[in-house]
Image: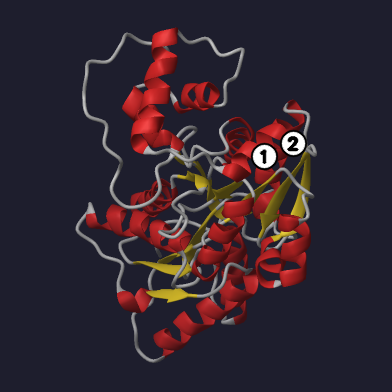
Amino acid sequence: MDGPPLPERAIRAPRGGAVRLADVAAAAEVSIALASRVLNADPAVRASAETRKRVLDAAAALGYVPNIAAKSLRIRRNGLIGLVVHDLSSPIHLELMQGARAEAAAHNSFLVLGDVDELLNDDDVFKVLVNGNRVDGLIVQGGHAEFGQRIADIARVLPTVVVNAPPRAEQDRVSSVAPDEPAATRMLTEHLLSLGHTRIGLVSGPRDSMTGRLREEGIVSALGAVGLELRPEDRVHADWSANGGRAGFIELASRWRAGTERPTALIAGNSLIGIGVLGAAARQGLSIPQDVSVAAVHDTWINEHLVPSLTTVSLPLREMGVVAVRQLLTAPDAASRIVLSEPPPVLHARDSTAPPA
């Protein structure tokens, strides 16, 4: 966005951390994309001489150092983009993959898939993929605290975008694209409240997961708005799998047998956990939704074919894939933080939820 000359003013570097392209753009009062094109001497950029000077002066005053990995992406392209996620077999990733693949194709690139746990735990895989010039950039599923520093290390040598979770403190130069997680669980909680449930429990993902904490925030917020709370004895942590959901439900059931009052509804941290909860409930002799209603985050094609079919809320995963690839290829050194509030979450009310008996 071009604009009039700025008045004389002091330009100060931001406190804490390296100067980012976004800081230069803010100081020059232009878009990140325009600042990037000016600083890279793009001959096709449409900007006045005054605007160009403003951007260059801001960069000089702030001591901006370009992201070398991002610059190499602009200079050299293999036409391959890596998308690495936890558990490639999970149906939850399908829409993310479809969106990323379509956007990569629109930029004449091809999407290759990998397992994030293998990449971050296996040094040989890490060296081949990250240091071997195999891909132009990586989209990495985040949300796991133990991999925070490793993702930051990757981003120093390869343009990287984290999806599905906000970046951690050590990832100050990493872009991210995430859905509005609290909005999704607020929607599920409000649906259960509208059915008449007043005691709602949670089977969540790992305790240190940022994604899990954000989803829990949404439940706490919705309950708090009507004077209720998410009780400590009604929540349990597991991993993001059907086995995790089963283990979490068994843990809750043991508390109920010991005398803890049973919630009339449970929210599962994702639909895989929800599937595990449905199976475990049946094995414990409980009927869904007569004894306990169950709802989960993320919708997949499987959920409507379960017995009972699983109530879910869907997040804009396809759009997340599109935006992540676009960010990686058009502004790799912007270190932007994008939370997708549009399109909003969508509720899919099915047989696993009903009014309490």
Residue at position x 46%, y 28% from top? 32
Residue occupying image coordinates x 56% and y 72% = 239
Residue 293 visible in the picture:
yes
Residue 70 vertical position relative to residue 24 in the rendered view, above or below = below
Disc 2 designates what residue?
A: 76
Q: Residue 93: percent from the left, percent from the top? A: 67, 51
Residue at image coords 65%, 67%:
120
Q: Is residue 108 left or right of residue 200?
A: right
Residue 72: mark in rendering = 1
Q: Amino acid at mark 1?
A: Ser
- Above or below 244: residue 303: above
| 234 to the left or right of 270 | left
Quarter of the image with the C terminus in it: bottom left
Nearer-the-camera pick, 166 or 336: 336
Q: Is residue 317 shown above or below 131? A: above
Report the side of 19 relative to 328 (left or right).
left
**Alpha-carbon neighbours of circle 2 within 10 Å: few (<14), some, or many (≥20)?**
few
Q: Do callouts 1 and 2 mark residues in contact (Cβ within 8 Å)?
A: yes
**Amino acid bearing label 2:** Arg
| Mark 1 neighbour class, 10 Å CA radius: few under 14, some 14 to 19, many 20 or more | some
In x, y percent, where is residue 155?
58, 52
Outermost residue toward the bottom?
A: 258
Query: Residue 45 appears in which quarter of the rendering?
Result: top right
